Image (tube, rainbow, N blue to C red):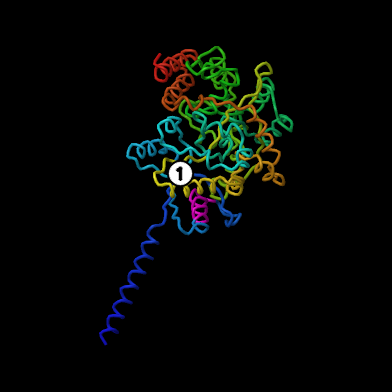
């Protein structure tokens, strides 16, 4: 009887130990945290008539990785664009960074300070070949790479223009021709004057070719580049946007508002969403953006923000033949913050590769984005009704340059001063020369101690 009792006790203890070990094993799942700003990507299982939210794709991709890796728990957070920089700065100070982060904000100094993991040892040879060189170059620091490339360019701001063909036709204005829709500045200005008119007969135009906004730094700066301006000298040791070319570009925008009346007044107080609104309302014939902005129209209709969809074409910014075409170019991806546990490091890198593999890069098609993978871009738009527009956009960004400097420069420190310069010029409280001179002086002081 004693032996039986002892056997029972031993079995109970054994079962408790097994249960304890099982519970410990379950508790020892590797947790991966990641941040992403709002991307309204449709996951594969979403109905085509649904409008994706910013949560849908990160939720799906996290769950899919956990399904493939039962030993991992993935926790995502969608961080607003407006608070992204402050949030990651606070996280770095508190030493509570996410494991992976979309590089809406990226600082070269993070890699130099050892806050990021280099990715070189985790990249397959075929990936090195598939990613565009400039996408890899963005994350290169001292011969190592720190960004897994994903998107090529952005939503198209500063890269290209949107055209409402119905307004062009109604005003008897010919569209720039495919395959690139390239047009000179003189052709653009002639068209812009025809696309602006006074509907109610009060002597003031109430329909315009396009609009400007002081806080829309990407597109407003693009116009300075159209005139041949550059933000920095060649070795990025001085801000030179107050050159004669930069002043001419800003003077054109002021004249477009007050002399030509091809753009509405109030640019000093406007932002990009004001410009988008004017374009969607048919108050302007030309907007800004790339293929993503075509998709925005469809999303706004499904969300009830826009009554009905309308056809849109893409065209590059106009150019002067002696200067040539120009566009903003940027790319993006995911960074991995420093990992102390080698086992977790392997899993985090595996998740970063998963986020940026062929299939999950191709998910950008639902936003009409151009991707950082050559192989994806070759196939995803072949049968698309937007193939021509993507082709025009791809041609436009082939002339892309970084308006705000390389990763060596933290331009965010001087963005408020550039916006203030645009506000002053648009409000005519300063001449374009004075406005850009003041900006250049402050920017050189802050960035270079001059």
In the picture of the structure, the residue carrying the numbered disc 1 is 100
| Depth order, front residue of 266/121 | 121
| Depth order, front residue of 301/355 | 355
Q: Does residue 269 show up magenta in the picture? A: no
Q: Does residue 57 show up magenta in the picture? A: yes
**Is 446 above or below relative to 328?**
above
**Is 106 above or below relative to 241?**
below
Q: Is residue 53 visible?
A: yes
Q: Give residue 88's quadrant in the image.
A: top left
Instruction: Name the residue rendered at 59%, 40% in the picture.
Output: 292
| Depth order, front residue of 426/445 | 445
SS type, badge 1: strand
Instruction: Name the residue rendered at 43%, 49% in the picture.
Output: 344
Q: Position of residue 143 (x, y in %)?
A: 52, 30
Q: Which residues are magenta?
A: 52-65
Q: Position of residue 119 (x, y in %)?
A: 51, 39
Q: How many marks?
A: 1
């Amino acid at each position: 009887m004693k032996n039986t009792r002892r056997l029972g006790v031993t079995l109970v203890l054994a079962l408790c130990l097994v249960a304890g070990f099982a519970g410990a094993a379950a508790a020892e799942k590797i947790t991966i945290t990641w941040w992403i700003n709002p991307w309204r990507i449709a996951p594969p299982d979403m109905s085509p008539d649904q409008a994706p939210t910013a949560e849908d794709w990160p939720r799906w991709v996290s769950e899919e990785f956990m399904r493939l890796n039962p030993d991992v728990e993935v926790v995502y957070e969608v961080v607003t664009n407006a608070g992204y920089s402050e949030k990651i700065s606070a996280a770095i100070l508190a030493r509570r960074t996410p494991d992976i982060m979309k590089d809406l904000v990226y600082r070269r100094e993070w890699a130099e300070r050892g806050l990021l993991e280099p990715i070189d040892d985790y990249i397959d040879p075929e990936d090195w070949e598939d990613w565009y060189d400039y996408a890899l170059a963005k994350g290169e620091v001292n011969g190592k790479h720190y960004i897994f490339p994903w998107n090529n360019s952005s939503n198209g701001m500063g890269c290209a223009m949107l055209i409402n063909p119905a307004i062009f036709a109604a005003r008897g204005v010919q569209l720039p021709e495919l395959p690139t829709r390239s047009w000179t500045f003189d052709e653009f200005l002639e068209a812009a004057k025809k696309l602006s008119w006074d509907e109610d007969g009060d002597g003031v135009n109430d329909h315009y070719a396009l609009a400007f906004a002081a806080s829309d730094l990407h597109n407003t700066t693009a116009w300075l580049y159209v005139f041949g301006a550059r933000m920095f000298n060649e070795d990025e040791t001085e801000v030179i946007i107050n050159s004669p070319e930069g002043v001419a570009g800003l003077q054109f925008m002021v004249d477009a508002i007050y002399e030509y009346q091809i753009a509405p007044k109030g640019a000093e107080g406007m932002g990009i969403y004001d410009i988008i609104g004017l374009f969607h309302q048919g108050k302007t014939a030309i907007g800004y953006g790339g293929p993503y902005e075509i998709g925005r129209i469809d999303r706004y209709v499904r969300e009830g923000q826009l009554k009905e969809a309308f056809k849109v074409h893409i065209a590059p910014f106009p150019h002067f033949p002696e200067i040539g075409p120009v566009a903003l170019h940027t790319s993006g991806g995911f960074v991995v913050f420093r990992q102390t546990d080698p086992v977790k490091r392997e899993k985090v890198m595996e998740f970063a590769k998963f986020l940026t593999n062929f299939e999950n890069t191709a998910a950008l098609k639902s936003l009409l984005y151009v991707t950082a993978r050559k192989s994806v871009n070759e196939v995803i738009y072949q049968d698309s009704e937007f193939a021509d527009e993507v082709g025009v956009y791809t041609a436009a960004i082939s002339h892309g340059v970084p308006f705000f400097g390389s990763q060596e420069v933290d331009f965010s420190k001087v963005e408020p001063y550039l916006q203030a310069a645009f506000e002053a010029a648009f409000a005519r409280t300063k001449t374009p020369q004075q406005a850009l001179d003041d900006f250049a002086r402050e920017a050189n002081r802050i960035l270079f101690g001059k």
